[in-house]
Image (cartoon, rainbow, N blue to C red):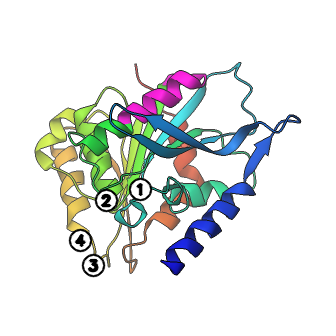
Amino acid sequence: MVKQTLLFVGVSVMFAGLLSTTHAGETTTGFLNKVYKGKDSNVKYVVFVPKSYKGDTEMPVILFLHGAGESGTDGLKQAVTGLGKAIRNKKEDFPFIAVFPQSQKGGWSAASAEGKRGIAILDEVMATYKTDKKRVYLTGLSMGGFGTWSFAAAYPDRWAAIAPICGGGDPKTAGRIKDIPCWCFHGDADTAVKVERSREMIKALKDAGGSPRYDEYAKVGHNSWDRAYGNAELYTWFLKHSTK
């Protein structure tokens, strides 16, 4: 309990230093703590709003699905690992609105309550901010990598591009998602999620007529996400794609 309390306090302090405010004290940009008010419960999530956001220009959006270790109800830690860490490490302004839902029970199947709530949170953010509906990108790591494949298959027309990291999907869905630009990442020394899970999805996409990109990192274990999200080309690649 003490360790959990210290972790929560540490994360809270970290986020406090990442927020931009108006002169009136109202937080408007940076990592913002939000609450999604569902039918049965209120669920915390985080949205990152670039400091350049003025509400007069449509901005691209990234939906990030975290891994199993960030599941819970604190509403914060899902924005610390992976994409959130990469945003904080960038010296220049990150040019996307980024959405960080949190799975409470673990799991990102698109058909599950967690998955449906993740989409509802994305919709809430897109209704709240001026966003570009043709440039919505999907990515996730580990459990969120599985979720990325699942969300892509369930909502193939929503995503301008996807970037699943160290996850896996159902090769039978390849026909539905072959036309979504895909850049997949995995470490070949991953013992938590075998690299074969990504290899089989890439093969299935190619067999279905798709042209996915795939980076397999030699001698890299489960944490292939720091290297993937630390690659500036990923974000340039995202912005090259939009839905019809």
Counting other residues with Cα less than 10 Å from the Cα at mark 3, is it few (<14), some (14-19), or many (20 or more)?
A: few
- Kindly indicate whether the residue at mark 4 contacts the one at mark 3 (C-beta within 8 angstroms): yes
Q: Secondary structure at mark 4?
A: loop
Q: Amino acid at mark 2?
A: Met
Magenta extent: 119-133
The residues bearing labels 3 and 1 have C-alpha atoms spaced at a distance of 18 Å
Residue at horizontal 31 percent and vertical 75 percent from the top: 190
Residue at horizontal 78 percent and vertical 44 percent from the top: 20
User: Can you identify the residue that label 4 sits on?
Assistant: 194
From where the camera sits, is residue 100 visible? no
> Is 38 above or below relative to 78?
above
> Is 133 above or below relative to 215?
above
Q: Quadrant of the C terminus?
A: top left
Query: Along the polypeptide, which appears first: circle 3 or circle 1?
Result: 1
User: Can you identify the residue that label 3 sits on?
Assistant: 191
Q: Amino acid at mark 3?
A: Thr
Q: Amino acid at mark 1?
A: His
Q: Residue 134's x, y, as percent?
A: 47, 23
Query: Along the polypeptide, which appears first: circle 2 or circle 3?
Result: 2
Observer-side mark, 4 or 2, equals 2
From where the camera sits, is residue 42 visible? yes
Query: Along the polypeptide, which appears first: circle 4 or circle 2?
Result: 2
Counting other residues with Cα less than 10 Å from the Cα at mark 4, is it few (<14), some (14-19), or many (20 or more)?
A: some
Q: Main secondary structure of the magenta part?
A: helix
- 5 or 225, nearer to the observer: 5
Q: Residue 165's x, y, as percent?
A: 37, 58
Name the disc covering residue 51, or none. Answer: none
Q: Secondary structure at mark 1?
A: loop
> Is 172 above or below relative to 239?
below
